[in-house]
Amino acid sequence: MKDHIELGRAGEAIALAHLEGKGYRILERNWRFGREEIDIIARDGNFIVIVEVKTRSSNVFAEPEASVTRAKQRILVRAANAYVNYRRLQGEVRFDIVTVLIRPEGETINHIADAFYATRS
């Protein structure tokens, strides 16, 4: 059994390959803004896509995407705004979640495009 750091890295690699396979152009991995981090930043057409990757070895207690709480969403929005301003990018920002279940029988990927929207709160 992999520890949680190894599991997370494996999940991000799987998510990255999935996105590249769908034609996304990867701009950044593990981009940091202070203590906040964006797992993957990509381009999908005119969209700047902020991707949160959640990796689990089981979904018995909850689906992985359930851990992207409102608080986590606010963190991602804040970091995305910083990234867009820092790089002076143009285009609409979209927030996706990619979940990866890594089990002995294989991996399962679920890509949720437009998983949430930036809101003021």
Image (tube, grey):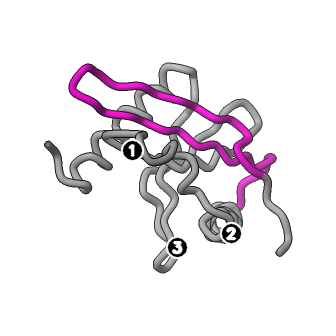
What is the three-letter code of the residue carrying label 2? Answer: Arg
Residue receiving disc 1: 55
Q: Position of residue 2 (x, y in %)?
A: 16, 46
Residue at x 79% of width, y 47% of height = 91
Report the amino acid beneath label 1.
Answer: Thr
Query: Could you say whether the residue bearing mark 1 is in a helix, strand or loop?
Result: strand
Q: Secondary structure at mark 3?
A: strand
Q: Label 2, label 3: how many angstroms apart (C-alpha)?
A: 13 Å
Q: Is residue 39 above or below residue 47?
A: below
Query: Disc 3 and disc 1: Cα gap in Å?
Result: 22 Å
Q: Position of residue 61 (x, y in %)?
A: 44, 47
In the depicted view, which residue is nearer to us: 80 or 111?
A: 111
Kindly identify which residue carries mark 3.
33
Magenta stretch: residue 106 in it? yes
Mark closest to the chain's N terminus, 3 or 1? 3
Pick the quarter of the image with the C terminus.
bottom right
> Is the stretch drawn in magenta largely helix, strand or loop?
strand
